[in-house]
């Protein structure tokens, strides 16, 4: 039993040094002696309890003294890569390596406190959007929550006291009617025009559009079935096909007449012997190289078109936001729009994808003005 400088018993494995610090030590199940020093007795006791627990529950392949970097690599490869979508795991990697690693990567898992997690979020405030800061918070919470579940640490340091430094922003752009018309006029004779038009007529995600096959289109019933998503992996140099973003992403979307006419014309061209690489012959949106178009290519093309149209640049996802907003402006019921967009919650539809444009606000205020005049 260890003692403090006054001779008081402190318990097995704990003692106080002449410099006032407390020593915590124990021998692991493998026979290795581990010792750490702490300025406070409670810290020494906490570390010792966690170290012993970690040693007893070492079946996951970790050891006492594990750093946050080491746990992240184990967690992302052995747990998350096996259980979540590729994009989700990629987001975890990006947020950790860009925002978390430099702050706490070299720290021991058992040493991380809520204040360290808060510092990470605070450091992002000036340069990052609120939604990105929120993603970092989610990454931190899941990283440490999994460590608790696997007995690496006793408590998750991402507590309720860890707050976002500013409200999550809706970092979305919606094209006004005028901007939409100007953009589509510039795009009209480009090879990507069908893709832009298709999203503005359906609201599908880019990956869902890229992954669309001819077998998914029922021209008799005028329905499109969303069954998959496809994206290009730059790390492996290959196209990856997977399910839609969520289970609600599996859905059917009615064809507008204009969209149906465009797709029928594209089908004629496809049946007419248009060049397509063998592995992509079933897909609808194929470029001149006989393959799908990568997201980065769309971004470059949109930037050129917006410059010509003298409007603010935007991303492909903006077209999805724009479709949703046009639907609401046209009087579509939010519940119907939710199903078309493939959202699990009506709140997601209204809060994240539907934006009231300045034109719409002005129009509604004019209605109020006319009503007020009648009442006067």
Image: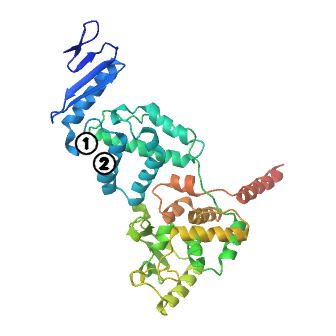
Residue 103, compared with residue 8, is above or below; it is below
Q: Are marks 2 and 1 in contact (CB under 8 Å)?
A: yes
Residue at image mark 2:
74
In the picture, measured across the screen, residue 320 lies left or right of residue 143, that is right
Give the structural element (helix, strand or loop) at label 1. loop
Q: In the rendering, at what x and y percent does residue 32 appear?
A: 18, 33
Q: In the rendering, at what x and y percent does residue 342 appear?
A: 47, 63
Dot 1, crowdedness within 10 Å: few (<14), some or many (≥20)? Answer: some
In the picture, measured across the screen, residue 197 lies left or right of residue 225, that is right
Residue 206, compared with residue 353, is above or below; it is below
Q: Which mark is residue 62?
A: 1
Q: Which colour scheme is used?
A: rainbow
Residue 85, compared with residue 252, is above or below; it is above
Tell me which residue sits at (47%, 75%) in the image.
Answer: 224
Q: In the rendering, at what x and y percent does residue 209 appear?
A: 49, 72
Q: Decide which of 88, 235 is in the foreground and name it.
A: 235
Q: Decide which of 188, 374 is in the foreground and name it.
A: 188
Report the Cα–Cα distance between label 2 and label 1: 8 Å
In the picture, measured across the screen, residue 60 lies left or right of residue 290, that is left
Q: In the rendering, at what x and y percent does residue 77 appear?
A: 32, 53
| Quadrant the N terminus occupies | top left
How many numbered discs, if any? 2
Tell me which residue sits at (35%, 46%) in the image.
Answer: 72
| Residue 164 shows in this picture | no
Toward which corner of the image does residue 307 lie, by quadrant? bottom right
In the picture, measured across the screen, residue 274 lies left or right of residue 7, that is right
Toward which corner of the image does residue 173 lie, by quadrant? bottom right
Tell me which residue sits at (63%, 65%) in the image.
Answer: 326
Give the structural element (helix, strand or loop) at label 2. helix
Q: Residue 97 carries which label?
A: none
Residue 279, compared with residue 196, is above or below; it is below
């Amino acid at each position: 039993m260890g003692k403090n400088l006054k001779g008081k018993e402190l318990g097995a494995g704990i003692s106080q040094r002449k410099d006032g610090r407390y020593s915590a030590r124990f021998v692991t199940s493998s026979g290795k002696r581990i010792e750490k020093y702490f300025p406070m007795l409670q810290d020494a006791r906490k570390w010792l309890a966690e170290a012993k627990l970690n040693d007893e529950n070492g079946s996951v392949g970790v050891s006492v003294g594990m750093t946050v970097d080491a746990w992240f690599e184990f967690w992302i490869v052995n747990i998350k890569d096996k259980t979540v979508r590729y994009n989700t795991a990629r987001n975890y990697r990006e947020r950790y390596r860009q925002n978390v690693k430099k702050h706490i990567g070299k720290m021991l898992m058992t040493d991380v406190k809520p204040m360290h997690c808060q510092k990470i979020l605070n450091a992002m405030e000036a340069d990052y959007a609120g939604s990105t800061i929120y993603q970092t918070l989610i990454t931190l919470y899941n990283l440490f929550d999994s460590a608790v579940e696997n007995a690496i640490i006793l408590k998750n340091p991402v507590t309720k006291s860890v707050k976002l430094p500013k409200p999550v922003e809706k970092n979305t752009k919606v094209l006004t009617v005028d901007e939409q018309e100007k953009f589509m006029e510039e795009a009209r004779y480009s090879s990507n025009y069908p893709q832009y038009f298709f999203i503005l007529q359906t609201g599908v995600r880019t990956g869902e559009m890229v992954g669309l096959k001819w077998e998914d289109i029922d021209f008799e019933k005028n329905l499109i079935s969303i069954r998959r998503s496809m994206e290009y992996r730059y790390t492996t140099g290959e196209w990856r096909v997977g399910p839609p973003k969520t289970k609600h992403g599996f859905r059917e979307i009615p064809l507008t007449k204009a969209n149906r006419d465009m797709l029928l014309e594209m089908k004629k061209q496809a049946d007419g012997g248009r060049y397509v690489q063998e592995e992509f012959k079933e897909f609808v949106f194929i470029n001149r190289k006989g393959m799908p178009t990568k997201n980065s290519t769309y971004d470059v093309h949109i930037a050129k078109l917006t410059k010509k149209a003298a409007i603010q640049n935007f991303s492909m996802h903006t077209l999805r936001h724009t479709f949703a907003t046009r639907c609401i402006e046209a009087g579509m019921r939010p519940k119907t729009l939710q199903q078309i967009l493939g959202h699990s919650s009506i709140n997601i539809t209204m809060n994240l994808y539907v934006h009231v444009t300045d034109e719409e606000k002005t129009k509604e205020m004019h209605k109020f003005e006319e009503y007020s005049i009648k009442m006067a």
